[in-house]
Amino acid sequence: MRLSLGPLQYFWPRERVLAFYRAAADWPVEVIYLGETVCSKRRELAARDWLDLAETLTSAGHEVVLSSLALLEAESELAALERLIGNGRCRIEANDLSAVQLCREQRVPFVAGPSLNVYNHRALELLIEDGLFRWVPGVEQGRALLAGMRAAVAADGGRMPELEVIAWGRLPLAWSARCFTARAHDVGKDDCGLRCIEHPDGLPLATREGQPLLTINGVQVQSEAVCDLGPELPELRELGVDLLRLYPQAAGMDEVVRRFRSAIDEGLVPTRAGAVNGYWHGQAGMPAAIA
């Protein structure tokens, strides 16, 4: 079982991003995803910067995948997506069907990201024909659904692609054309001033009663608590999961990586360090006391 470092979901200053990936070059993860998946206005790093990072990390022995936006809203974003897919160096994580179509046209193998919403084996098989080689299920697709998908693909005489499951980090729940962070600061989306950069792990959102509820991250909504499937490692192995995805956070990411690496290499079952794992077990995504 391998580890992957998912794409950075938050908006950090340029030097912080570069320092993060300089450190990540020495971490025991096999796959690193790079790029902006949330908002096209976040331009601390240009396309050239991401490609330079990809070259550095590849030289350090990592497989690098370039991730696309989950929500495209303008022709300019589609043009940028086409250039990303045609980079000629790295594979792509397709996070919407525009990316799938362009990958198919350019014959570029791709990872199906968690925002593609693949819920049955027929859809999965069609995407495999288009060039899918790895699938990251949506956050709510737990053990039972994945086992059913694997059985259905086998019954059709097919073969499952590589399976990558989100094992750590705040879960990306939804995207919207509206910017939640701008709304929280009482400014318009077009005049947001890139306020996301003030919240390196997103902006906590509570209920009117003051109970933690969600995390807002620009146009993205995340879980309030961190998902941690470390204690489910035996189930993940049994299901045939190939990669565990760890989403970056502002502090302590090296410790998270080493905790999972040690657990995999030594056959350990670590204690839970996060609070959200209900989806994996087919239950509510957050504790009932909060929901």
Image: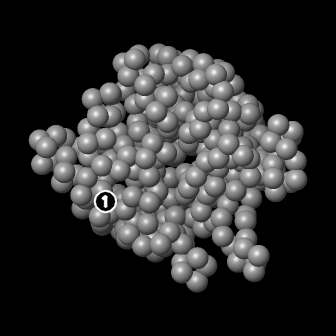
Q: Report the residue at 54% width, 33% height from top.
A: 68
Report whether 206 appears left or right of 236.
right
| Quadrant housing residue 254 | bottom right
- Where does label 1 land, which residue? 145
Residue drawn 41% across and 16% down?
Answer: 106
Where does residue 146 sit, x and y in percent of width and height? 30, 56
Q: Is residue 84 above or below residue 71?
A: above
Residue 2 visible in the displayed image = no
Q: Which quadrant is the C terminus positioned in? A: bottom right
Q: Is residue 143 left or right of residue 148?
A: right
Secondary element under disc 1, as helix, strand or loop, is: helix
Q: Position of residue 168 (x, y in %)?
A: 51, 59
Mark 1 is surrounded, within 10 Å at the Cα level, by few (under 14), some (14 to 19) or many (20 or more) other residues, namely some
Q: Which residue type does callout 1 highlight? A: Leu
Q: x, y percentage for residue 252?
A: 63, 58
Q: How is the image coloured?
A: one colour
On screen, 74 above or below 263? above
Identify the residue at image location x=73%, y=64%: 204
Query: Is 187 displayed left or right of 244 in the figure?
Result: right
Residue at the (54%, 81%) spot, across then down:
288
Number of numbered callouts drawn? 1
